[in-house]
Image: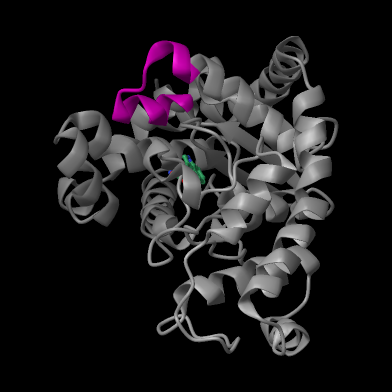
């Protein structure tokens, strides 16, 4: 069975964009792969989160994973900071990575505008390479914004293999089914995001039915009245169509055909109803999970993840002679 690794930052409440863009895909992959899903709290430090918020967000992120159907008996769910192996391998791998490569990372350029040019942000991709290689992952499901980091991981792995022993599989991007790219309901030109300044444009995992209806009803569309799919000219409406297609499992084409005769108002209500059907079991499951249960799950995940991480780290150290 092939191994999958992916990471999610515990920075703010999980929302529809995370669910449709990534987590539904993570759930699906459990059937075919040995999956490691890691809450990357060491990576979060690069953006200086508030201590209490981080503690809460870490727990809530695992709740969200389980709420969408990721099964802790099948997949290994754990906190990155519970395994010393990530940081240790990251140090080792930093010797296989050029400064120039890190300078070319577009996410570094973007994020350093907000958080400064500190070394944590700069070496973020090396830690990410360590995450992936510590479990010898074969495939990594990531969004477009992470493909550059994954490319770098592949280069680092190849260099290590070449210089020492061929121990790392070269990880591929998993794109069996790329998730929907869900945009903000208020600013449909940008992605739905965790940031707290776009609450009205974001459907959170905890939103109740009334909130869902309100947010969809007040979502930005356009001044025409005919439904069609065109991301450039009708970004708001196209986003709603894409959300609907994604939750019903239908194609965009089928979905457009189904709703093409509707008025915008009726269409929005239809989207809201479908969204409630999709989200309410997820929300119920999320709310039913206690913090205590999550800590049990993450302890178990830590123990299981330690087994493979120990093995790889030992192998790496043997190669290096340390
Ligand atoms: N950088 C990723 C993101 O922001 C999170 C992440 C950390 C990750 N380590 C990873 C994703 C390893 C995939 C594999 O989304």
The image quadrant of residue 78 is top right
Residue visible at 65% across and 56% down? Answer: 20
Majority secondary structure of the magenta segment? helix
x and y percentages locating residue 104 in the rendered image: 20, 56
Position of the C terminus by quadrant: top left
Residue visible at 60% across and 37% down? Answer: 135
Above/below status of 113 relative to 55? below
Residue visible at 26% across and 30% down? Answer: 120
x and y percentages locating residue 47 in the rendered image: 30, 30
Q: Can residue 160 be seen in this view?
A: yes
Q: Nearer the viewer, residue 126 or 193?
A: 193
x and y percentages locating residue 12 in the rendered image: 49, 32
Q: Does the magenta stretch include residue 67?
A: no
Taking the image as shown, residue 119 lies to the left or right of residue 86, namely left
Q: Nearer the viewer, residue 89 or 161?
A: 89
Q: Which of 21 and 32 is in front in this view?
A: 21
Q: Does the magenta stretch include residue 45?
A: yes
Task: Tell me which colouring the rendered structure shows.
Answer: one colour
Taking the image as shown, residue 152 lies to the left or right of residue 226, namely left
How many discs appear? 0
Q: Is residue 69 visible?
A: no
x and y percentages locating residue 53 in the rendered image: 46, 18
Taking the image as shown, residue 223 lies to the left or right of residue 266, namely left
Residue visible at 64% across and 21% down? Answer: 306
Taking the image as shown, residue 299 lies to the left or right of residue 14, namely right
Residue range of the region highlighted in magenta in the rendering: 41-54
């Amino acid at each position: 069975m092939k191994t999958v690794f992916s990471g999610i930052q515990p920075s703010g409440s999980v929302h529809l964009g995370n669910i449709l863009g990534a987590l539904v895909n993570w759930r699906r992959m459990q059937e075919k792969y040995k999956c490691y899903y890691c809450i990357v709290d060491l990576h979060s430090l690069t953006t200086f989160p508030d201590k209490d918020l981080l503690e809460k967000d870490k727990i809530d992120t695992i709740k969200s994973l389980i709420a969408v159907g990721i099964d802790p008996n099948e997949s290994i769910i754990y906190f990155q900071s519970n395994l010393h192996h990530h940081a240790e391998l990251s140090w080792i791998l930093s010797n296989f990575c050029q400064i120039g490569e890190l300078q070319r990372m577009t996410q570094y350029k973007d994020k350093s505008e907000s958080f400064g040019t500190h070394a944590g942000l700069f070496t973020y991709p090396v830690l990410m390479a360590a995450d992936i290689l510590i479990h010898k992952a074969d495939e990594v499901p990531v969004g477009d914004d992470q493909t550059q980091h994954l490319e770098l991981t592949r280069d680092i792995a190849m260099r290590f293999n070449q210089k020492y022993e061929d121990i790392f599989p070269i990880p591929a991007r998993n794109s069996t089914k790329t998730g929907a790219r869900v945009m903000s309901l208020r600013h449909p030109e940008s992605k739905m995001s965790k940031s707290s300044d776009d609450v009205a444009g974001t459907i959170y995992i905890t939103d109740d039915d009334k909130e869902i209806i309100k947010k969809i009803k007040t979502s930005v569309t356009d001044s025409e009245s005919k439904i069609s799919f065109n991301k450039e000219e009708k970004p708001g409406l196209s986003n709603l169509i894409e959300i609907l297609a994604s939750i019903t499992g239908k194609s965009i084409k089928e979905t457009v055909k189904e709703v093409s005769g509707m008025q915008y108002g009726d269409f929005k209500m239809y989207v809201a109803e479908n969204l409630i059907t999709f989200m309410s079991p997820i929300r119920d499951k999320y709310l039913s999970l206690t913090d205590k249960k999550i800590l049990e799950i993450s302890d178990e995940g830590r123990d299981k993840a330690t087994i493979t991480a120990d093995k790889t780290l030992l192998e790496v150290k043997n190669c290096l002679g340390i």
